[in-house]
Image (cartoon, rainbow, N blue to C red):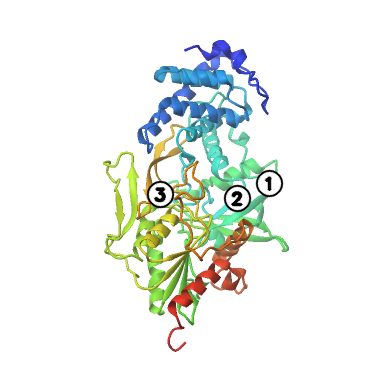
Amino acid sequence: MVGMAAVGLMLVAPAAPVPAQPPVPAPKADRFKAQEFARIVYQTGEAVAGRYARPVEMRDLVDGAVRGLYEECGLTVPDRVRQAVRGATGATELVDALTDVRLLLANQPALRGPRALYAAVNGFKHATDPNSQLVSPRANTFASVDMDFHIGIELEGVGAAAWMLYQVEYRTALGQYAPAGWLDPRPRPEDVAAPAGVPWRISRVIPESPAQKAGLKPGDVITHFNGAEVRAENANKLFAQFAYPPQMFDPQTGLPKPFDRTLTIRRDNGKPFTASVKGTSYTPASAFGVIRTAEDKWDCVLDRRYKIGYLRLGAIETGLDEKVAEMLADLDKKGCRALILDLRWCPGGYIDPGVRIAGMFLPNNALIAQMKYRNPNEPGNERDLRNVFPDIPHYTKYPIAVLIGNETTGGGELIAAALRDNDRCVLVGQRTVGRASIQNIADAGFGGLSFKVTIGESFRPNGKPRQKKPDSGPADDWGMKPDEGLEVPVTRDKSAELRKWAELHALRPADGTEALDFDDPDKDPYRVKALDYLRKKLGKPAEGK
């Protein structure tokens, strides 16, 4: 293999124009750090190669890592770099190739600190799939939340890559992690830039959280935190205190303890107000009905004349099946004759509660999903998921209309497929996302992060694929499509509006009297279509109604 250092001047001046300045080779003294970087990337690649759903060559993973580095800089991989990587044989040459590339890009600002490791490891997607990626250490155990600040809010800008990188940089600055694989020195805590811009705007409030109970809403702006005004010059310091409150853990026991946050909130068309929010453990709500009762539970009867129930699922959290069972039991007591199961904004989540929820509507031993793994004989890799849960209730008689849309993902699609292929429902709405990958976690090798790697694929009970591939066309089998005549032709803007209505509806407290758009099913074309179908299916209203 021709060493890339020998052709450095040719590599940093590709023929095609690029949007960033060409990098300058780093001093030779940095080569040890670059080798450390390369070894971390390579070792993580080995873990991925051993577990990925299909065989993948280390050369392909390293090639993907190199591509990830250049893409992060806004650069095109020069042909000579790619040829050098593709020509490498064995672990030593591949690590050397990664080392050379890191040195060639040493002065790129986009790769400072842990950002080079992040870009390279996430570049494995080019050799695997987009769903195989880095994931942050959870600040909680929720399926759909990266950071809720322990009070149940998300802030604009604080998510995905930005939040992951902040965690690594800030904790490294505190000395909790070594700056392994960095070419840069360890930063000072006060120099780590907060991912949230100023002002701090709330993008999401999680139902049943302390923030929801304190009356916070999406769009609210936090102007003061614990009495201090949030300004550009103090935002880094305040954000660190907001994300990592020192009083969150009992110094004697090390266990979490409640703590108070005082927030001054500015709301559009309203006067600023102060909210005291207690940070504590809580269980987020992921199952919603029609209206909250005085007991702060959900009444799930949507049509009282026909006794049609309505149940909407968000993220499939641990314990969601128990909540769904409780809500279905209440519907059963009220004489439910049909059900609308709304999965439009279900982003998936944990597989066990999802399978149990599907099983509630199916007969014993019904096939829920077929699972195909690269290593099917490993413990826990079951080939078939069946309804074999003696402790769950069963509702196998009344008709069901399942609402699906272009945001129904993963576990939501699994539930829809299980019910549809077992002739327990019709599907109403729009085609789903098409995500059916089975994933597991591998240590990323730096900063406490993990790499979510695809280890298999879930198929419908009838054997058809649900996973949308890069070359999948409209006529191919992927995702779940509505039944003929039950399509709902709405725009993405209308879908986004409906989602916003549903989120605000879920946040209204039990004693709230404000009328909301989502209260009226006639404003929702999905529920209009489903109600029309179920009323015709039932034939006439319930007796005495």
Amino acid under disc 1: Val
Measured Cα–Cα span from mark 1 to mark 3? 45 Å
Q: Which mark is residue 465?
A: 3
Outermost bottom residue: 544
Residue at x 49%, y 20% (from the top left corner): 85
Q: In the picture provided, is 351 more to the left or to the right than 365?
A: right
Q: Bin the neighbour count of mark 3 within 10 Å (Cα to Cα): few under 14, some 14-19, many 20 and up.
A: many
Of badges 1 and 3, nearer the viewer stands: 3
- Vertical arrangement, residue 536 with respect to residue 245, above or below: below
Q: Residue at x 54, y 14 (%)?
A: 29
Name the image quarter holding residue 15: top right
Residue 540: x percent and y percent? 46, 83
Which mark is on residue 221? Answer: none
Which mark sits nearer the N-terminus, 1 or 3?
Answer: 1
Badge 1: few (under 14), some or many (20 or more) residues near its Cα, within 10 Å? some
- When asked about the image quadrant of residue 539, the answer is bottom left
Q: Position of residue 165 (x, y in %)?
A: 55, 37
Proximity of marks 1 and 3: CB atoms separated by less than 8 Å: no
- Disc 2 residue type (three-letter): Leu
Q: Nearer the viewer, residue 366 or 43?
A: 366
| CA distance separating discs 2 and 3 | 36 Å
Which label's residue is closer to the chain start, 2 or 3? 2
| Circle count | 3
Q: Secondary structure at mark 1?
A: loop
Residue receiving disc 2:
155
Q: Dot 3: what SS?
A: loop
Residue indicated by mark 1: 198
Compute the Cα span from label 1 to label 2: 11 Å
The amino acid beneath tag 3 is Pro
